[in-house]
Image (tube, rainbow, N blue to C red):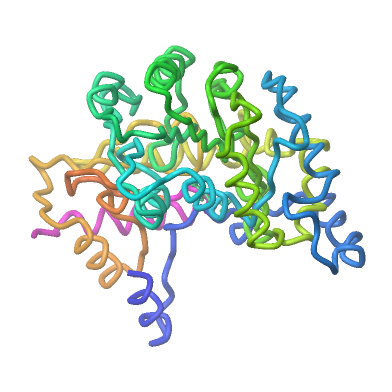
Amino acid sequence: MLRRAQELEAAGHRILKLNLGNPAPWGLATPAPIVADMVQNLVDAQGYSDARGIYSARVAVAQHYQTLGVTSVQPDDVLLGNGVSELIVMVLQALLDTGDEVLVPSPDYPLWTGAVSLCGGRAVHYRCDESAGWAPDLEHMAAQITERTRALVVINPNNPTGAVYSEEVLLGMIELARRHGLVIFADEIYDKIVYDGAVHHTLAALAPDVPVVSMGGLSKTHRAAGFRSGWLATSGFSSTDDYLDGLQLLANMRLCPNVPAQHAIQTALGGYQSIEELIRPGGRLLEQRDHAWRSLVAIPGVDCVKPAGALYLFARLDPEVHKIHDDEKLVIDLLEQQHLLISHGTGFNIDTPDHLRLVFLAPTDVLDDAVGRIATFLSTYRQ
Ligand code: PLP
C-alpha cells in the first residue's frame, strides 16, 4: 500500500495519509524545551554512551516509574532504546526459544506479532471484545495458555482500538501471568494520552511480584517520534534471573541507542507535561477525536467504539451493509480512487475483513475531508 501511495505521489497526485501515528508533521510539535535540551547537548553526545543509556536519563525513567507506584525500579533496571520498536525486538529475543508462545492481543500493534515470529516464537492471539469496549477477553486468554506460553503482551492504552483497561481487567491478566509463570510486556507508549477522565493504570504498579517489562517513550506523548527515544523498566524479576543478563547482552551488542535523543528524556519526563493541553476539554486531540468519531459513525453501515485513549479510530463496517471480503483491497481501492491512505483491520491481526483504522492527528478540516472521501467511496463500493 505504501509503495502504491509513493507511486501515485511520484505521478503527481497528493495523497492524504492518515495511516501513521506520527504527531509532529500535523503541527503537533515536540515541546520546545525538549528540542532545546537535545540541541544543547549535541556537543557532548558525539561518542557512544553506556550501552543501557546515559545515567541521567535512566534516573529520570526510574523516578517516573517510582512516582507511578512501581517502587522497586532503580536506574539499573532501566534500558534505553531507539524507540520502543527496537526494545520490542530485544525483549522477545532475550526470552524466546524456537517454538515458544507469546500471548498477543487481537487486534494488535502488528510489530508485536511480527517480532515474535522474527525471534522464532509463535504469536497466539487473545481476543479483545469489541462489544465490551475492546476489553481483553480473559476467558479466551486463559484458554490459549499452554506449557509453551512464556509471555503476555498488554498494550494499554491500545493501538489500534483506543481502549484503556480497567484495574479489574488488568488484575485479571496479572493473575493469569502469576499462575502460569509468564513475563508481562506492558507496552504503555500512550500512557498519558487518555480522554474524558479515563485513568491509565500502570500495570507494573499492580503486579509487584510478577516479572513485568514496562515500556514507554517520547514518540507519542512528547510528539518526538523522529528522535527515536524509548525506554524499558524491569520489575518483579529475581536478581539472579538470566533473562536480565540476556537483555544486557543484547543492549551491549547494539553498542548504545542514539545518544542525542537520550538527553531529551530527563527534560521530557521532569518538565511540564504539555500533552495535558491537548487532551483536556478544548484541547486539540480531544476535539479531533470527537469530530472524526462523530462524522465517521454518521456514515451508513459504519460504527466505532469511541476511543478512550491513544490516536486512532478503529471503525467497523457492518457486514450486512458493506459486504467486504478483502479489506486490504478495499484500502488500496480507496487509495486509488480517493487518494486517501488508511489502514485495513486484518493488518492488525483480526480474523474478519471488516475494520479500518484512521489516525486522528490531522486538524478537523482535514479529518472532515478524509471522512467525506470515505463516505463517497463506500456509497458505491462493492466487492
Ligand atoms: N507500541 C505501540 C503500541 C505503538 O503504537 C508504537 C508506534 O506506533 C510503538 C510501540 C513504537 O513506537 P516507537 O516510536 O517508540 O518505536
Q: Main secondary structure of the magenta part?
A: helix
Q: What number of labels is visible?
A: 0
Is 133 situated above or below 51?
A: above
**In percent of the image, x 87 and y 54: which residue is there?**
37
Using the image as rendered, state which of residue 121 and residue 301 is in the foreground: 121
Give me the residue at 32% from left, 40% from top: 101
Is residue 158 or residue 59 the one in the foreground? 59
- Describe residue 124's horizontal placement relative to residue 179 as left or right: left
Q: Is residue 299 visible?
A: yes
Q: Residue 264's x, y, as percent?
A: 79, 51
Screen quadrant of the N terminus: bottom left
- Quick one: quadrant of the C terminus? bottom left
- Extreme residue toward the bottom, this view: 11
Quarter residue 316 falls in:
top left
Q: Is residue 146 left or right of residue 358?
A: left
x, y (%) of residue 307? 43, 33
Quarter of the view holding residue 131: top left
Left or right for 199, reference 290: right
x 39%, y 38%: residue = 293
The residue under the point 44% across, 18% down is: 178
Q: Is residue 27 visible?
A: no
Q: Is residue 221 magenta?
A: no
Q: Position of residue 32 (x, y in %)?
A: 81, 52
Q: Which residues are magenta?
A: 359-383
The single residue placed furthest to the top in the displayed view is: 168
Q: Is residue 298 above or below residue 144?
A: below
Is 373 in the magenta?
yes
